[in-house]
Amino acid sequence: MQRKRLIRIDPLGGVAGDMMVAALLDAFPEHESALADALACLPLPPPVSWRIEQGTFSGFQGKRFHVAAASDHEAHSHHHYGDLVELIGHCGLPPGVASRALDIYALLADAEATVHGVTRRQVAFHEVGAWDSVIDVVAVAALLEAIGDTEWLCGSLPMGSGRVHTDHGWVSVPAPATSELLAGMPVHDDGVAGERITPTGASILRHLDCHFDTRCAGRLLGSGTGFGSRELQGRANALRLLVLEGTEQASGFSHDRVVQAVFDVDDQTPEDIAIAVDLLRDMPGVLDLSQDTRASKKGRLGFRIELLAQPEHVDDILAACFRQTTTLGIRYHDVERALLTREHGEAATRHGSVRVKTAFRPSGDTRKAEADDIARLRQSQRQRQQARVEAEHVREDE
């Protein structure tokens, strides 16, 4: 039986680079040496140092990750994006660690470039280019690389409120680059002020390609809690990780959760419904869509549309259903489904190649050619036959 690791992020206090480092270390203390080895590669100025603090914070056990310097200048001196690429790429970090760290900074650079209207290479990092942030990013990269293949889940993110001081002056929370990185992620206002998601934290979430759905199933293996340095009113400034072992059945099928949405329409023409169904079927996150006719109220002919959607896209899909059809209400709920493992390939025939889908069933593998490709080959064959007939008629006329 194959097993996969799931880690669920609970961003109670928020998400920041140092909090993620501390939570990962608390959940996987055996990888502290990987972190130390990676940070030893950085040419840190002598006053800059880091330490891991284990203790009780806000009444709970966990870790904090500190970066210290003799003065604010050493800790908060900034770098240009090109400088960081050179530094991280050529300081002797293991390739996997360097690749992850560079990806996190590339995401940050793209966000900064968008909000300032410059190119990636023109970006000058201030807060996120300081030594404390560089250490956080490399430390996270080292721990993620040591942990290995993992599926990441995350709950809704606290937006925070108020203002934060930057090198560009006071800006509203979330900061502009953070807002750019959080685009598309679920957020909420829990009434607690301050910066809750830092730019580094947001770029780490992007790097992890998180699924924003905390529903998960598996065997709980452990947890880790990382604390930030700031105190929050009414709650712990903590980021918690839950580490689970999911399973994929040896019989070849796996499980997941999707959203099933159903609605009825009886006051829209068949032509309009056909167009709406095509548009909905092509939307990101729509996994399947079916349409049935049914007897509706007042003896009218109606249509029932049912679709399966990925949870992270459900709001956009529901909005599109309201835009494209005349329905006034949609019923939806979470469902579990079992999925066979599948592979896609091609097969050569005497008429041309076709795409083939292989399904690994408990009773044995099955293969099926794509219907569109078969139709295409048939149409091509008819056209060739018609061309031959026309050519023969031309020769007879001659």
Image: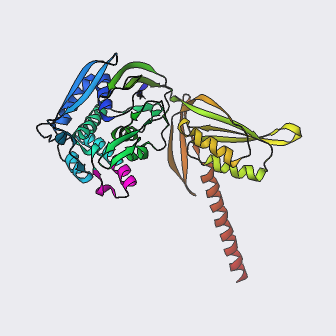
In the displayed structure, would residue 213 be above or below residue 107?
A: above
Residue appearing at x 40%, y 47% in the figure: 176
| Residue 1 seen in render | no
Q: Which residue is painted at 55% across and 32% down in the image?
A: 339
**Frontmost residue, 26 versus 51:** 51
Magenta: main secondary structure equals helix
Residue 195 against residue 62 in the figure, above or below? below
Q: Quadrant of the C terminus?
A: bottom right
Q: Quadrant of the N terminus?
A: top left
Quadrant in which residue 28 is drawn: top left
User: Looking at the image, which residue is at 35% across and 58% down?
Assistant: 118
Q: Is residue 141 above or below residue 121?
A: above
Q: Residue furthest right?
A: 299
Residue 183 located left or right of residue 270: left
What x and y, as percent, mark residue 316?
Answer: 58, 43
Q: Quadrant of residue 76?
A: top left
Looking at the image, residue 134 lies above or below residue 362? below
Position of residue 325 measured from the top left corner of the image (x, y, whole percent) = 71, 47
Q: Nearer the viewer, residue 293 or 32?
A: 32
> Which residue occupies the extreme bottom position in the image?
398
Furthest-left residue in this view: 46
Residue 45: x and y in percent read 13, 40
Q: In the shown orientation, is residue 357 left or right of residue 16?
A: right
339 vs 139, nearest the viewer: 139
Magenta region: which residues? 108-124
Find out whether residue 119 is within the magenta segment: yes
The mark tally for this picture is 0
The image shows residue 394 at horizontal and vertical percentages of 69, 79
